[in-house]
Image: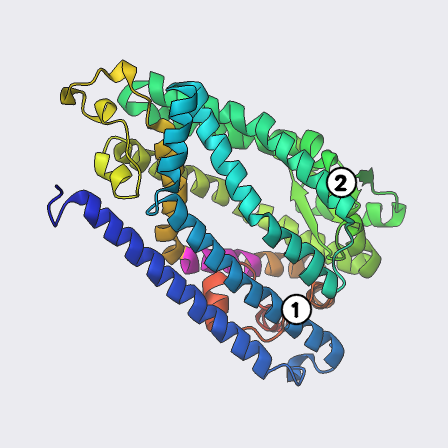
Amino acid sequence: MSSPFSPSLALTLAFAVALMLGLVLKYWLATRQIRHVARHRAAVPAAFAGTITLAAHQKAADYTLAKTRFGLLETAVGAALLLGWTLFGGLHVLNQALLQWLGGGMLQQLALIAAFVLIGGLIELPLSLYQTFVIEQRFGFNKMSFKLWLADLAKSTVLGALIGLPIAALILWVMGATGSVWWLWAWGVWMGFNLLLLLIYPTFIAPLFNKFQPLEDEGLKARVTALMQRCGFAAKGLFVMDGSRRSAHANAYFTGFGAAKRVVFFDTLLAKLSPGEVDAVLAHELGHFKHKHILKRIVSLFALSLAGFALLGWLATQAWFYTGLGVSPSLSLLAPTLGAIAGQASPNDALALLLFVLVSPVFSFFIAPLLARFSRKHEFEADAYAAQQTNGADLGHALLKLYEDNASTLTPDPLYVAFYYSHPPASERLARLTA
């Protein structure tokens, strides 16, 4: 019988408290956002009175309210699913069922990961359908047919299996074959995989879902090329993506890494912005590269991942890590002196990976404001760079069009912004630009 202060019970309590505190905080922030946006729905803010119509402002407010309320449902479903997998024993039951069917070994571990992903995806499928065909449809953003949605789902599932299962098998093999420092080798594999994805995504993966045509507008191409040369940036190509096939939202982005970098414009963006405004949006993205934001984020990802794998390397050897989260591990692999032969037991590697993936967001949620703050700082720096390289007024006009086009509310709750927003709200960005 466990003592009152056993590590297993301590983890259970810490997990339950962190989950409850996170839920309370999420619901409090969401209700603040809902009240704040609804309170300011009736009138356009004075700073935007001459540029944003009341109808557009109210559409943005209603869209924000709908998404935030739906987010509350998603939060509740996510918390219930998390509890079901952990403290209520769902992962344990699934693991035991697969052990009885397949026995121990690599096949059972891969089956556990695949079944976990498949069951979670099926549970969340109705939420995805509702968001696309009810919320996005209601506000005129969804352009997908149900047939296209199904095709995307099928492609994503097959692609996830073709890419995910081999990398999972490799990491599981590393965990079992490289001794006590397996986490260092696994981290290297994971980082290499992420860098490889940056290289192959633009050429091999993205075209499976969208069509990419070379930019044909010679005048715009000349402007964009001149801007990139002025900024010292080289890209493999300028492309237009058929974003309008799925959504009315507009965007532009860089993708790829090293020699595979390319500039991608949504066709919806080019339809709404003037050439000068397109220049300004592109200069903003170039600002991220000029300030090395992308490199800083990659380095941060490397560091955080290394810390995560090191922590997992220790937790995976602790019986209380499993039992405190509702799972019974193969104790003979954690403590061979218990009498069982380690080679006859099923490895705990897949269990450790899944538990870590499930639980770590519960605790890391509380540092979200810090990460969001750094992201907003980067956006301000990129805006300032764009204003130096192009017409600041064009950037302001482009931002206003994009905020309006994407129905982004002009009146978000300040605390909600501080906690969640990776991009500054329109009022702050435009105030910085005019200053």
Q: Mark 1 falls on what kind of element?
A: helix
Question: Where is residue 15 drawn, in percent x and y?
Answer: 30, 51
Magenta residue span: 368-380
Question: Which corner quadrant holds the N terminus?
Answer: top left
Query: Closest to the observer: 239 or 162?
Result: 162
Q: x and y percent of residue 171 in the render?
A: 43, 24
Q: Which residue is mark 2?
A: 210
Q: Classify the position of the C terminus by image quarter.
A: bottom right
Instruction: Tell me what residue is drawn at x 81 percent, y 60 percent.
Output: 272
**Type of amino acid under label 1:** Tyr
Where disc 2 sits, the SS reads loop
Tell me if I can see residue 123 in this picture: yes
Residue 88 coordinates in the image, percent (x, y) = 35, 47
Residue at the image point whose x is 71% and y is 53% from the top: 251
Label at residue 63 = 1
- Amino acid type, residue under disc 2 in the picture: Asn
Q: Nearer the viewer, mark 1 or mark 2?
A: 1
**Residue 364 x, y percent position in the rendering:** 37, 51
Residue 308 sits inside the magenta stretch: no
